[in-house]
Image (tube, rainbow, N blue to C red):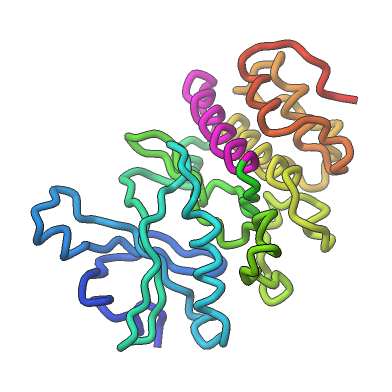
């Protein structure tokens, strides 16, 4: 039986599932109608609803892992970070889930399919700024995203939203007693956007998030990903990326984390045209 066939159409007597919006390493996100808000006359009763994927439904700590993602993200309040609403459990059907804002738009992986040559700089620049603003805010709050890639970035009429913190981590998690995801249990990282030290078994850090964001920006500017076999020192400046901003992006793409000599906010600052030697 497929995961979709096993999912009930109505959860908690309130949320009517309509269609799948996307799938990730740990969960499936649906568009759902909030029937309570609809009955009360809310003109926009749609929410995005996340359930655990089929591979996790039988895990004894599955609901804890889902709540862990919700707890990690619920306190974030930024215009370019997805806003979470509530964590709920349908006890009759033994389904845990959480709801969040629903956006009309497309993820950046779909946008890249429509723009194989990359985006012109006037279109790319606001996307880059909003992504780096969102990620910088998360880092200021002590939250690491863990899986920055085009499929986890939505672009709509309201601007950009960074979402899916399922592989994320909070610096205060251990002191709060929250469960963490054992990444050895699944092939978590997307190799194209994961920093080399993560693939080698290293820890999640602000620099690994920076690397993922830099890979996304490179692909948006060049129309293709940085070549895995090519040393970062010899990467060409993307065709749609201003040369005066290239040293900062190249530093963020360094395979050696010690050579990523800037933070997310400094990469964002470089897009404003301030000259600085980011490279070593």
Q: Nearer the viewer, residue 1 or 183?
A: 183
Horizontal side of residue 257 vs 111, given as left or right: right
Assign the C terminus to one quadrant of the image.
top right
Q: Residue at x 72, y 44 (%)?
A: 206
Q: Give the residue at the far front of this rendering.
A: 175
Is 134 one of the magenta-colored residues?
yes
Q: Nearer the viewer, residue 239 or 96?
A: 96
Q: Residue at x 33, y 47 (%)?
A: 103
Residue 5 visible in the current orientation:
no
Q: Toward which corner of the image does residue 155 lie, by quadrant?
A: top left
Is 185 one of the magenta-colored residues?
no
Assign the N terminus to one quadrant of the image.
bottom left
In the rendered view, tell whether residue 113 sits above or below residue 66: above
Q: Residue at x 10, y 57 (%)?
A: 40
Q: Residue 28 location in percent, x, y?
A: 44, 68
Q: Residue 257 location in percent, x, y?
A: 85, 43
Count of picture labels? 0
Horizontal side of residue 32 vs 142, given as left or right: left
In the rendered view, tell whether residue 214 sits above or below residue 46: above
Horizontal side of residue 241 vs 207, given as left or right: left
Residue 64 visible in the current orientation:
yes
Most frequent secondary structure within the magenta stretch: helix
In the rendered view, tell whether residue 117 sits above or below residue 138: above
Q: Residue 150 location in percent, x, y?
A: 54, 46
Residue range corresponding to the magenta coloring: 117-140
Q: Residue 188 location in percent, x, y?
A: 66, 66
């Amino acid at each position: 039986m497929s995961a979709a066939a096993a999912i009930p159409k109505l959860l908690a007597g309130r949320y009517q599932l309509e269609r799948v919006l996307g799938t990730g390493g740990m969960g499936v996100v649906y568009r759902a109608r909030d029937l309570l808000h609809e009955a009360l006359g809310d003109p926009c009763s749609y929410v995005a609803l996340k359930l655990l994927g089929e591979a996790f439904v039988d895990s004894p700590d599955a609901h804890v892992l889902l709540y862990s993602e919700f707890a990690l993200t619920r306190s974030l309040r930024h215009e370019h970070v997805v806003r979470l609403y509530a964590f709920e459990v349908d006890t009759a059907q033994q389904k845990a889930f959480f709801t969040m804002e629903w956006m009309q738009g497309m993820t950046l992986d779909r946008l890249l399919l429509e723009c194989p040559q990359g985006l012109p700089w006037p279109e790319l620049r606001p996307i880059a700024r909003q992504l780096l603003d969102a990620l910088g805010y998360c880092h200021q709050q002590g939250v690491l995203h863990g899986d920055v890639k085009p499929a986890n970035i939505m672009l709509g009429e309201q601007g950009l939203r960074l979402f899916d913190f399922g592989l994320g981590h909070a610096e205060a998690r251990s002191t709060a007693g929250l469960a963490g995801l054992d990444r050895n249990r699944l092939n978590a990282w997307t190799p194209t956007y994961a920093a080399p030290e993560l693939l080698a078994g290293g820890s999640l850090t602000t620099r690994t998030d920076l690397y993922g964001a830099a890979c996304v920006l490179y692909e948006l500017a060049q129309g293709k990903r940085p070549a895995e076999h090519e040393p970062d020192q010899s990467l060409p400046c993307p065709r749609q990326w201003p040369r005066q901003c290239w040293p900062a992006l190249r530093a963020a793409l360094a395979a050696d984390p010690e050579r990523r000599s800037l933070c997310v906010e400094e990469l964002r600052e470089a897009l404003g045209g301030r000259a600085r030697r980011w490279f070593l």
